[in-house]
Image (cartoon, coloured by chain):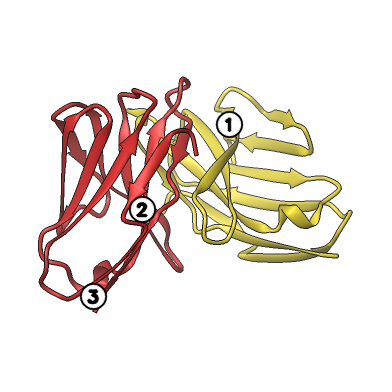
Amino acid sequence: DAGITQSPRHKVTETGTPVTLRCHQTENHRYMYWYRQDPGHGLRLIHYSYGVKDTDKGEVSDGYSVSRSKTEDFLLTLESATSSQTSVYFCAITGLITDTQYFGPGTRLTVL
Amino acid sequence: SQQGEEDPQALSIQEGENATMNCSYKTSINNLQWYRQNSGRGLVHLILIRSNEREKHSGRLRVTLDTSKKSSSLLITASRAADTASYFCATDARSGGGADGLTFGKGTHLIIQP
């Protein structure tokens, strides 16, 4: 998995609670991404980062925030979780060829 | 909005046969990539083809790209049970390249029957 870990791997939470997912890389790559995967939608980009403290929104960023205080860590926060945010969340980094992405194992989040 | 759309959504073939899946996209691209996802796992990069390339090979994989039709195909030859997975095409936004994220299709679920 190209030196990418995600934590937690599974989480069940209740509507209205804040949730933070962590992506950690050991590759020292500049670019990191958060996607969500839902049946019938494929993967959709939530946010991405192009450097420490440099982030931008993706296609489905509403209800999510991100932070990157260190090169190796990219955090995704659901400020107030809703049932529509039940999904599998994948972190990705770019390799030496910028356009090729390497994915973490995913976090399955259930919001009750 | 979905940039790439795979076709068919599901495909079931016998082991040893060839599997072909297609991808169509809407806007100009710098490159197109194919990824595989085994059940419950993350995506694994298979192959990248640039907009100025028409065909690319990697082992049992053959990818074609037709930019005039905005379509690509992935051929897996001599399929094996281990090829059972979902396959996704992904494109970049031409202006930003892949650095600002990829747009994925919904995937083709391939089942290889023994």
- Image side of residue B20 versus residue A81, left or right: right
Query: Which amino acid lies under the numbered mark 2 shown in the image of this protein?
Result: Arg
The disc numbered 2 marks a residue on which chain? Answer: A
Identify the hue of chain B.
yellow
Q: Could you tell me residue A58's position as x and y percent?
A: 25, 45
Per the rendering, the mark at residue B2 is none
Q: Could you tell me residue A43's position as x and y percent?
A: 41, 54
The residue at the far right in this view is B16
- Image side of residue A88 versus residue B114, left or right: left
Which residue position is annotated with label 2? Answer: A44
* SS under mark 3: helix
- The answer to whether residue A112 of the structure is visible from this angle is yes
- The answer to whether residue B70 of the structure is visible from this angle is no
- Quarter of the image where one finds residue A50: top left
Query: Which amino acid lies under the numbered mark 3 shown in the image of this protein?
Result: Ser
* SS under mark 1: strand
* Same subunit, tags 3 and 1: no
Comparing labels 3 and 2, the label whose residue is closer to the camera: 3
Give the mark, 3 or 2, whose residue is nearer the N terminus: 2
Per the rendering, the mark at residue B48 is 1
